[in-house]
Image (cartoon, rainbow, N blue to C red):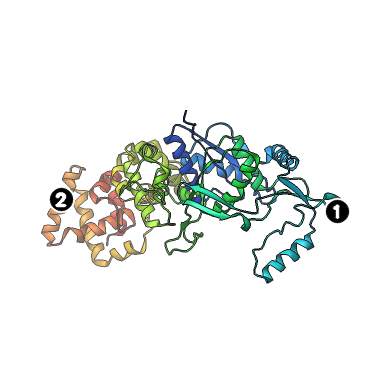
Amino acid sequence: MTKKVITRFAPSPTGFLHIGGARTALFNWLFARHNDGEFHLRIEDTDRKRMTEGAVEAIYDGMDWLGLDHDGKVVSQYAQRARHVDVANELLARGKAYHCYCSVEELKEMRESARAEGRPIGYDGRWRDRDPSEAPEGVKPVVRFKSPNEGETIIKDRVQGDVTVANAQLDDMILLRADGTPTYMLSVVVDDHDMGITHIIRGDDHLTNAARQAQLILAIGWELPIYAHIPLIHGADGAKLSKRHGALGVEAYRDMGYLPSAVKNYLLRLGWAHGDDEIIPQQQAIEWFGLEGIGKSPSRFDFTKLENLNGYYIREIESNESLVEICRPLIEKSLARPLTEDEITLLISAMNEFKPRAKNINDLAESTLFLFASRPLNFIPKAEKILSPEARNILADVAELLAKATAWNVETLEAGITSFAEEKDLKLGKIAQPIRASLTGKNTSPGIFDILIWLGKEESLARIKDQAI
């Protein structure tokens, strides 16, 4: 019988859910869903000093925004600490761990000597086989794992291949601190076992931890999980990802106007491939996802690609009502007032003309503001440049022409403006650009005839006359 696939995402609550962590969560979620398995969320909150206020809620918010639902209750690693201590004590009883009474000064001297002699900097095992009766007074011991000194540990990694580590390179790691609290390395191993995790999918910065954890798992007598260590994300310049490259919290991408569907599609392709497919909706991703598609080389974060994907997913939102609901809070914040029912209706009907140009939700919302702006309009520099004295003279004639329009529809307006251009021997753009600038305060927008209809005759004429000579 095939064992059910169970994965986990285990962030530390030291900040927001950053983009690298979001990709790790996504890969674990997809692998579980592809295999009809389970995906669990564990908060690794054993290091209470490094925890930041609000970080746990920020992780929840980020996961919710991305739509990465987890199975069962969230596990707090800190809440399981008594269980971790029990396992350490069991290892002590079986001779697989021991008390170490080294002082802080001894450990410092040990490191300095190793550094001076060019040896690996680590614990030298001096209390490994000593009798506790030799312990100095007043020193609270730590509990160390008695790792194998000979041979090698092999991690059969589903991404990196077989990774071999000589056991002599690994020192005896601490399981319980002097105050009796468990360390991260012990807690992770125990929690993964108790949660029934079958596949550990995480960044390859944990690859060295895997050998230590595997030794501990085997010493306890548990079955090894399947490992898959994903190469890290780099910036476009090949350097380690930093804030200037895009190593931000997920909430920052939401605030920049990215859709969760676009972010997930982008993160999926950031280190995983299915042929040459670039647009991979969520259901398709679940159907296709497998560990064999993960590459061995670091990925490079590219904002341009993310923006292009985001534009695609904006255009894919068929319901204009849904798109307006996404944009509405941003529009109302800019206007400092709520939209009226008539304005919402107008926005829904106009959205098909706005969304093809949008790369993000912020730009989309901003591009519609002229519809609800009060006169006199504010003009961007490029629009002001368009409104030269010659252009303002043209607007005066246009205002006179439009005032006489007997019907206010696209066909009538277009015919009138085209005829006017021919009469004045002007290219249509020479007339359309000043009209656009006067109506919107910008140099780019949907078609001017659509705008004239949206604004209506009275408002359109008022805006044009404001800029006419």
Label 2's element?
helix
386 sits to left or right of 164? left
Looking at the image, residue 461 lies above or below residue 64: below
Q: Is residue 101 or residue 295 the one in the foreground?
A: 101
Q: Residue furthest bottom?
A: 116
Q: Tell me, yes or no, if residue 252 can be seen here.
A: no
Q: Which residue type carries mark 1?
A: Glu
Task: Locate the C terminus by quadrant.
Answer: bottom left
Q: What residue sits right under mark 1 in the picture?
A: 134
Q: Residue furthest front?
A: 150
Residue 400: percent from left, percent from top: 21, 54
User: Which residue corresponds to the image point at 40% horizontal and 56% vertical from the top-left?
Assistant: 303
Q: In the visual, does 220 lie left or right of 133?
A: left
Tell me the residue at 32%/44% (across/down).
315
The residue wearing badge 2 is: 416
- Taking depth in this image into account, of 352 and 80 the one nearest to the observer is 80
